Amino acid sequence: MTKAYERLLKCYQCFKDKINFKPEVALVLGSGLGDYADTIRVEAVLDYHDIEGFPVSTVSGHKGRFVFGYVGDVPVVIMQGRVHYYEGYSMEDVVLPTRLMKMMGARVLFLTNASGSVNYDYKAGDFMMITDQISNFVPSPLIGPNEEMLGERFSDMSEIYRKDLCEIIRGEQTQQPYVEQMYQLVKDLGKEPVIVKKDITGFLANRLQYAMLREALYLVEEGAADVEDIDTVLKAGLGLRYAALGPFRVCDFGGLDTYNRVNQYLNETLCDRKEGDPLLAKIVAEGRCGVKSGAGFYDYSGDKAAQATAERDALYIALAKVLYQKKQ
């Protein structure tokens, strides 16, 4: 165990001793946005000074505390102030808060900051979305011994800005003009915006993905098919149709009367498990976490991980060119 990880564990234990809260979303507030944390339904506050070994911001206007609460029904942890490399902190210090929020339970991270611009079309207070970056003036936080508990050394950075789909979540108090403004901004960035009309756990893509995964795991557990068979069914049939048309247009072409008739008797046989899947939990407990660990549902030992990644990327690019060539 590295010293950095030992320090992270101490910070996490300090948090656990003081706060009983599990966030799903982490939000780092940059300069000018700190007051947003005061508008949510606050459940608890934890000052950075009260966390053993935690770096404390020295920048004016950064309160230096975690705020725990709810945005709508979503449990969030908000950083009111962060530490910066220019303050004299090491990169280990700079990334520690993000790693800590991950350990708290956060699965989604929103980063914000105040920035200048060389584009005369921008005005003070305008919102913008970062779509690319060039970083050659700060050391990488990956330097030094790799801590396996935090993941593989080289994270996949290929999709951090390039995802075509962008879900715009509308909160209970979000005014329509702001929704429309964000929709247009995302569209101007060349992405495919979708407005989620209510704040629902997991939003859209995750809920659809995990509903399908739940049934796929269930079919394997019941002995109806093996992993390879399930993947083949989706790749050769259902997945291709859904990628091209989406589920509702597929139903229209198939005939809604047919889908309604099948729906009447098939739904009661589908998996309706509410807790986590035991097969998935078992595989993870065995240390098989997928490509990054060398094994998951498939074997990725030796050169197989690099080969599988290259094949995946080639397939994604080829499919995207066919499905979305009208955008190019």
Image (cartoon, rainbow, N blue to C red):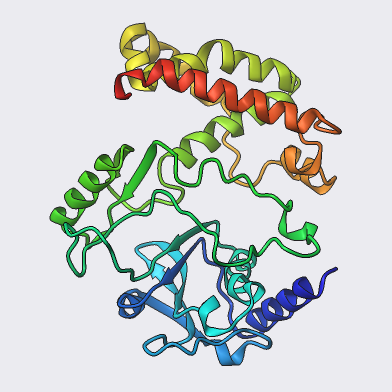
Up-down relation of residue 289 to residue 76 (above or below): above
Query: Could you say which is closer to the camera, residue 66 or residue 59?
Result: 59
Q: How many marks?
A: 0
Q: Position of residue 59 (x, y in %)?
A: 44, 87
Residue 5 showing in the rendered view: yes
Quarter containing the N terminus: bottom right
Please state the horizontal and vertical placement of residue 287, each as a whole percent of the image.
Answer: 83, 46
Image coordinates of residue 143 in percent, x first then y, are 72, 63
Where 249 falls versus 209 (above or below)?
Answer: above
Asked whether 7 or 162 is in front, the reply is 162
Residue 272 location, x and y as percent? 57, 35
Left or right relative to 287: residue 63: left
Which quadrant holds residue 121?
A: bottom left
Picture residue at 55% right of the left edge, 30% below the top: 212
The quadrant of the picture occupied by the C terminus is: top left
State left or right for residue 271 relative to residue 112. right
Instruction: Decide which of 198, 323 is in the foreground and name it.
Output: 323
Residue 224 can be seen in this image: no
Q: Quadrant of residue 263?
A: top left
Residue at 48% across / 19% down in the picture?
A: 319
Q: Residue at x 30, y 19 (%)?
A: 326
